[in-house]
Image (tube, rainbow, N blue to C red):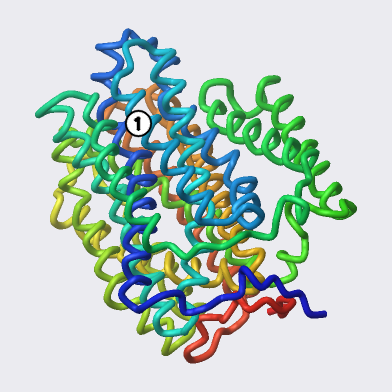
């Protein structure tokens, strides 16, 4: 069956120069989004001291952002298809930039938490449509592979840059500047986006204005993410966790049922007909759950066991960012074009598995060069995994579903990270308490807890490898998937 939406038909929009400028704008937004998630963690002690946060309240400077961001991605992606992805992108950047100003000027806990929630709203609006814009800009296989490699590089670099930059800004100026730094980037991004991003009318709200579905999915995702991030406080079997988790699952189940019967569904279920789309999103969720062990628990190990400072920790993890960035920027596109995304993805997952396996043996008195630097280099596998997953996760989506596919892909990212936070942190803390009760010293007990987290992360990567091997279809030479054609998606 043919399905044509002329305003969304993919074209080689503008000149080659304008398309690469557009990629710069999209990458800058992703950099801000990722950076903002990690830059706050280093400044949290200073924020707590200046604004009088309680220990429990301080966690909401992170949770408020995660709940809004993860909960709204799917809705924002679909609305981008309906009202126009450029309009959604610009509105999201405007909200994020204004919220950053509010956060930097915060004088109390309530004001900062509100600003962080609004930052999450703006990030969801902008980042939900980024991949949808990218795949309609770059339709030729080689160019798309290169563009996705560059885009993945900025995302990978953002996390490490955030940790280093957060330490520098907090020490040299104040924590307020970790938010104020978003203002010039945001304003420049908006100004450039108006000029270089392709305009489109969108399919119109009548094509998918499912208000009931929007309420169900947004409520279900927000409540689910809230439940997950609070597991460390309440525990897995607490009434709080089980009760809210059940409500969240019920809302999401009702949303799926609604989409199967609604005349104009918010999320047409046809998008899951593609094995590559469904499989890539599941692999991404498992992989990012595991990679929390590297991004956060390795940092905790360096600070709490090895005695590194915040800035030293960021610098120690910099080789990983360089390795991931170098591979995604200079190697991944060529390998994807030559061998196919599935083969490259499996190779990258094997390297990440090696890194997690190595971490299960790090000692209490680790030497950076012999015990940690090999991990930083093996993490380069992420530079293979991320671009391959991005291409596969956007494959099979029609042009008028590109925003939805982008929002779905980003939603599974956030869910994966939230699950990683809950599962690995809780397991590490429980194991540490057990070892302390058995008479171990604090450093040994912490190291034992982290070893368990790294082992579980390795198991998650094994599961991701199995899904990639069994579910994803082989993508042969040069198939960067022309997935934005307005025909019905092929089942891969």
User: Which residue is identified by label 1?
Assistant: 100
Q: Residue at x 29, y 33 (%)?
A: 444
Label 1 secondary element: helix
Residue 62 percent location from the top left of the image: 42, 29
Which quarter of the rendering shows the C terminus? bottom right
Please give the name of the residue rendered at 46% of the width and 67% of the height, measured from the top-left corner: 134
Q: Is residue 160 above or below residue 179?
A: below
Q: Is residue 247 left or right of residue 24?
A: right
Is residue 453 toward the left or the right of residue 277 in the image?
left
Percent position of residue 417, x then y = 49, 45
In the rendered image, the quadrant that contains the N terminus is bottom right
Which is more toward the observer, 159 or 426? 159
Q: Residue at x 42, y 46 (%)?
A: 292
Residue 147 location (% of width, % of height): 38, 72
Which of the 4 image quadrants contains residue 314?
A: top left
Q: Position of residue 14 (x, y in %)?
A: 41, 75
Q: Nearer the viewer, residue 87 or 421?
A: 87
Placement of 468 over or under 464, stated as above or below: below
Q: Residue furthest left?
A: 172
């Amino acid at each position: 069956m043919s399905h044509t939406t002329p305003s969304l038909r993919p074209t080689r929009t503008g000149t080659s120069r304008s398309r690469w400028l557009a990629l710069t704008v999209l990458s800058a937004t992703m950099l801000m989004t990722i950076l903002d998630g990690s830059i706050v963690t280093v400044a949290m002690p200073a924020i707590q001291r200046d604004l009088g946060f309680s220990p429990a309240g301080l966690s909401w400077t992170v949770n408020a952002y995660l709940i809004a961001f993860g909960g709204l991605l799917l809705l924002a992606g679909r609305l981008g298809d309906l009202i126009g992805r450029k309009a959604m992108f610009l509105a999201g950047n405007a909200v994020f930039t204004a919220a950053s100003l509010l956060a930097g000027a915060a004088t109390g806990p309530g004001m900062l938490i509100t600003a962080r929630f609004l930052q999450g709203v703006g990030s969801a609006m902008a980042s939900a449509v980024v991949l949808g814009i990218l795949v309609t800009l770059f339709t030729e296989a080689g160019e798309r592979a290169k563009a996705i490699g560059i885009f993945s590089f900025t995302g990978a670099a953002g996390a490490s840059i955030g940790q280093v930059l957060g330490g520098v800004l907090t020490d040299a100026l104040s924590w307020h500047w970790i938010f104020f730094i978003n203002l010039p980037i945001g304003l420049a991004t908006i100004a450039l986006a108006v000029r270089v991003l392709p305009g489109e009318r969108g399919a119109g709200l009548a094509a998918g204005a499912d208000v009931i579905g929007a309420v169900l999915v947004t409520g279900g995702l927000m409540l689910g993410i809230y439940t997950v991030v609070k597991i460390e406080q309440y525990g897995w079997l607490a009434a709080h966790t089980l009760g809210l988790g059940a409500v969240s699952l019920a809302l999401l189940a009702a949303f799926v049922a609604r989409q199967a019967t609604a005349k104009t569904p918010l999320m047409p279920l046809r998008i899951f007909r593609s094995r590559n789309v469904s499989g890539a999103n599941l692999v991404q969720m498992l992989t990012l759950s595991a990679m929390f062990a590297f991004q956060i628990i390795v940092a905790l190990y360096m600070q709490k066991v090895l005695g590194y400072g915040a800035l030293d920790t960021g610098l120690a993890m910099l080789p990983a960012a360089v390795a991931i960035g170098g591979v995604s920027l200079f190697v991944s596109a060529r390998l994807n074009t030559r061998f196919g995304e599935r083969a490259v993805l499996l190779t990258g997952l094997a390297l990440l598995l090696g890194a997690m396996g190595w971490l299960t043996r790090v000692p209490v008195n680790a030497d950076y060069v012999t015990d940690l630097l090999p991990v930083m280099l093996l993490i380069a596998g992420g530079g293979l995994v991320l671009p391959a997953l991005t291409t596969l996760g956007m494959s099979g989506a029609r042009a008028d579903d590109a925003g939805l596919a982008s929002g779905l892909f980003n939603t599974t990212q956030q869910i994966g990270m939230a699950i990683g936070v809950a599962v690995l942190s809780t397991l590490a803390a429980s194991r540490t308490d057990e070892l302390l009760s058995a008479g171990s010293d604090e450093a040994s007990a912490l190291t034992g807890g982290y070893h368990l987290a790294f082992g579980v992360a390795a198991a998650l990567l094994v599961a991701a490898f199995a899904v990639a091997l069994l579910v994803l279809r082989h993508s042969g030479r040069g198939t960067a998937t022309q997935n934005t054609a307005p025909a019905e998606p092929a089942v891969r």
